[in-house]
Amino acid sequence: MSEYGDAAAALRRVGALETTAWRRSGWYLRFLLPYGAAQLVIVPALVLLPHPLGAQVSVGLNTVMVIVLSAYVARQRTVRPGFGWRHGTVIGTWAAAFVATSWLGSTVWHGSVPFAAVATLACLLPFAAGAWFEIRRTA
């Protein structure tokens, strides 16, 4: 009979752990929002400022954001199932948009305000979509 009791206790602990993970997983939204907001400065700086100042400002701000947000993420204790796939999709999509923006913004459309506006939206969209899905998932 103790085997059944041990199994039931283990299942209760698993259920409690899952509940804790869902309750404490709002940190990812607090990660996505500042990084997405930073795109409003990073991308226009890269496209509109003269070379090499635009790249320096963009890389500097991006580096600060990665360091600060990585320190924040390292302090988080819980991650929901499927987080790695979701985060990889958000960051991978952003990276593709940012590489395209960097290349086109420094070669073809450097200094173009319309391109800067579209590129900013393209780089902001992965974080906004990730935040939207996170809000829906935790609601």
Image (cartoon, grey):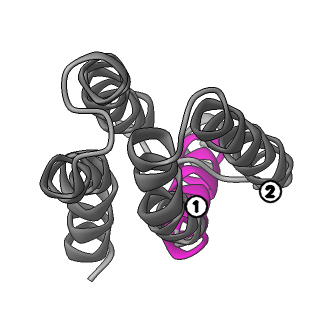
In the rendered view, does 52 fall on the left or right side of 135? right
Rendered position, 29 above or below 70: below
> Looking at this view, is 26 or 8 the one in front?
26
**Helix, strand or loop status at disc 2:** helix
> Looking at this view, is 124 or 46 the one in front?
46
Q: Position of residue 2 (x, y in %)?
A: 68, 42
Residue assigned mark 2: 72
Residue in the picture at 57% in, 47% down: 79
Residue assigned mark 1: 31
At label 2, counting other C-alpha atoms closer than 10 Å, the crowd grade (few under 14, some 14-19, many 20 or more) is some
Q: CA distance from mark 2 to mark 1?
A: 8 Å
- Count of numbered marks: 2
Q: Which residues are magenta?
A: 6-25
Q: Position of residue 134 (x, y in %)?
A: 31, 65
Rendered position, 56 above or below 80: above
Instruction: Kindly report the secondary structure that dominates the magenta region of the rendered protein.
Output: helix
> Looking at this view, is 94 or 51 the one in front?
51
Q: Position of residue 126 (x, y in %)?
A: 26, 48
Quarter location, residue 50? top right
